[in-house]
Amino acid sequence: MAIPALRSARIQRLLQRVQRPWSRMVARRVLERNDALAERLLAELARTGQGEFGSDTPRAVSSLLTRSDVAVMLVADTPSDAVTRVLKLPLSAEAVQSTATHRQVVSTLHSMPMLRSFVALIPRALAWGDFEGQHFYLETALGGRIASDLVRQGTAPAMFKQDAVRAIRQLHIGTAQRRVVDSVGFARLAGDDLARLYEESKHWTDSARMRDALQSVEALLRRKFLGLTLPFAWTHGDYWPGNILVHAGGGVSGIIDWDRAIPNQLPLLDVLHLLAYLRKMQQRTELGEQIVEYLLPAAFDRQEQVLVDETLEHYGLPADRDFWHAATLLYWLRFTTANIVRYQRLQSDTFWLSKNVFTVLKRGLP
């Protein structure tokens, strides 16, 4: 079974490489169609006093199409000025919902007195609605560069990892409430995600073995979390370098894309995602491989270990190996389910499933 699966994965990757030029051309055409609409929309927002613009002629100075079907335009008061606003045009029903969720989250966080310092790192919603049949959303722009670009180039600030963990910690500690994990809390923490993967496992290669492994994961999580008192807080939900902005001289300048943020979650999950994703980018592997080779064995260097110990202490979490293993598998469960739900193509992507799901189920259990 391994050889056909490998061939299938290679074919999928080859098809993706062939499709990239076509995808880029489609994205350019989509953006071109929306450029004129954005110009009219910005003029209307300026005319009606929305958007807090500093001139009557704001302009989109650059644009991109995300893989979530959102046309994102960086806006300046004039073409020669610095970018001060971000305009988002969601182009599908899912993108409309995602953008609405992002707006609701940032508005909620900005309304919380305990986050008065932290919200300087997140955008502020300015205007939203429908224009010529197109949904739109406008927010403030944040300074700095996207950290993922710097990580790929090997030029990220030396303290980026520490700065990023300490930045998101402000959100976690500011909104944390400690509660005992009962049966209802366990369902919210892991049960719903487990149910989704049990359903998905019916279609996997070696389904019976994978289901047995899932049952082992569930048993471990129940044994470790039920009855435990844990901190629950708002989490970002996709805290990776692509959603973090940094100052030129170091330090986090902003955190973007809050559409996966939810309250009442274990805050450690954001930190685990950041650590695993950084390692994934540096090693050029899949996330599931780094969960098995890096997170589960806690294969940290000295600085990382200090940061992890500091994080566990701040959150009041157990520092023992069994808890770390359970928390990492909980993170894997959340990551896997969230991506399968968000990107339906992954449900049948043999390569992605092999590296991110089956690898963990085969090698990640104690």
Image (cartoon, rainbow, N blue to C red):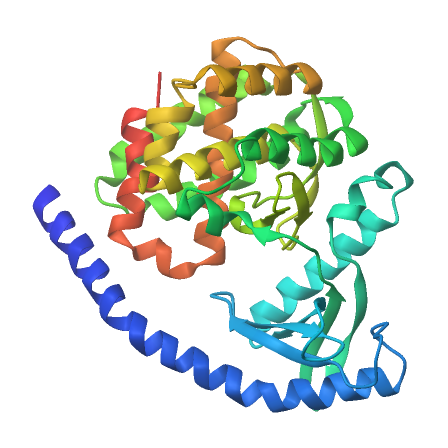
How many labels, in total? 0
**Which x, y percent locates residue 180?**
72, 20
Q: Is residue 65 above or below residue 178?
A: below
Which one is nearer the viewer's eye here, 84 or 315? 84
Q: Quadrant of the N terminus?
A: top left
**Which x, y percent locates residue 50?**
86, 77
Q: Residue at x 70, y 18 (%)?
A: 314
**Residue 153 left/right relative to 303:** left
Furthest residue in direction left, as rendered: 3
**Residue 205 left/right relative to 177:** left
Report which quarter residue 312 is drawn in.
Answer: top right
Which one is nearer the viewer's eye here, 95 or 166? 166
Q: In this rendering, does residue 203 appear at all?
A: no
Q: Is residue 143 above or below residue 292?
A: below
Q: Quadrant of the C terminus?
A: top left
Q: Residue at x 40, y 22 (%)?
A: 296
Which one is nearer the viewer's eye here, 363 or 157? 157
Q: Residue at x 73, y 51 (%)?
A: 122
Q: Is residue 102 above or below residue 35?
A: above
**Which x, y percent locates residue 224?**
54, 16
Q: Is residue 223 above or below residue 7?
A: above
Q: Residue at x 75, y 22 (%)?
A: 179
Furthest residue in direction top, as rendered: 320
**Which x, y percent locates residue 301?**
43, 18
Q: In this rendering, does residue 74 appear at all?
A: yes
